[in-house]
Image: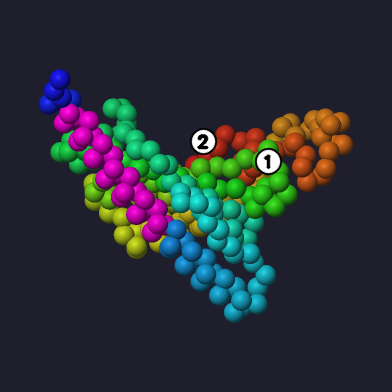
Amino acid sequence: MELNEKLKDLVFDKSDLKQQVFNATKETFEMFRNTTRELIELFQKQNQAEHRNVRFEFTDRGDFEFEVKFAGDVLIFIMHTNVFEFSRDHQVMKSPYIREDSKRSYCGTIRIYNFLADSFTYQRVQDLGYMIGRVFVNYEKHYFIEGKRELGMLYNNFNTSLISSESVQSIVESAIEYTTNFDLLTPPYDEVKLVSVGEMMSDFDKKSMATGKRLGFRFQADTDV
C-alpha cells in the first residue's frame, strides 16, 4: 500500500498551516497577557499614588485564559485552542488579501468578555456577561476584530494590520475604555416586575434574578454605547 500523494499533501499541508496559526495566536495571546498585566500594574501604582480606593487586579487562569478586575468590572480574555476558517459569505473572504492566498483565511481567535465584578464576588451564577470583541489572527500575524464600537470599528483592516506590542496595548486600552463606558442600565420595568416566592426566600446575593449591563435590552443592536 502507498499513500495517495494528493491526500498526503493535503493532510500534511493543512496540519502545518493550522500549527502555524496556533503558534501565531498563542504568541499573540501571551502579548495580550503581558501587556494587560503591565497596564494593570500601572493603574495600581497610580491608584496608590493618588490614595484612591479603586480595585485593580490581574489573575492568570491557565495557559489560555486570564482576567482583570478594575472598578466594578471584569474582563476575561480567552484563547480558543482550535483554528477556524471564515465562511464563504463573510466579508473578509472578499478582500484581495485573502484572494491572493487562501491560507490567510485560517485564524485563531482570542475572545474578550465583560462581566460585573459583583457577579463573581457574590457568586451570582445566573448573571450575564457579554463578548465585547474577538480577535482573529492568521499565520502571518495579521489580525482584525469583530466587536462593539471602539474595538470593532477601529481594528478591522485585515490586510494591513499586524500584531505588535503597540497594537496589543491599543486594543487592551480600547477594551478597558469600552467597558468603562458600557454602563449598567436599569432593565425595563415589565422585565423585572414579577418575583417568585422561591427567589425571595433564597439568599439575597444568590437570587435567580439575573443582572447584566443590558438585561432586557437587545444588546446585539446596541450601537449607541
Q: Magenta segment: does it hold 22?
A: yes
Q: Amino acid at mark 2?
A: Gln
The N terminus - image quarter: top left
Q: First in sequence, mark 2 or 1: give its number.
A: 1
User: What residue is rendered at 22% in x and 30% in y?
Assistant: 11
Q: Which of the two marks, 2 or 1, is nearer to us in this view?
A: 1
Chief secondary structure of the magenta portion: helix
Image vertical order of residue 110 relative to residue 208, above or below:
below
Residue 79 % position (x, y): 43, 46
Q: Amino acid at mark 1?
A: Val
Residue 119 seen from this side: yes
Kindly state the secondary structure of the residue where label 2 is placed: helix
Kindly state the secondary structure of the residue where label 1 is placed: loop
Q: Which residues are magenta?
A: 8-32
Q: Which residue is identified by label 2?
A: 220
User: What residue is rendered at 31% in x and 55% in y?
Assistant: 163
Mark 2 in CB contact with mark 1 (< 8 angstroms):
no
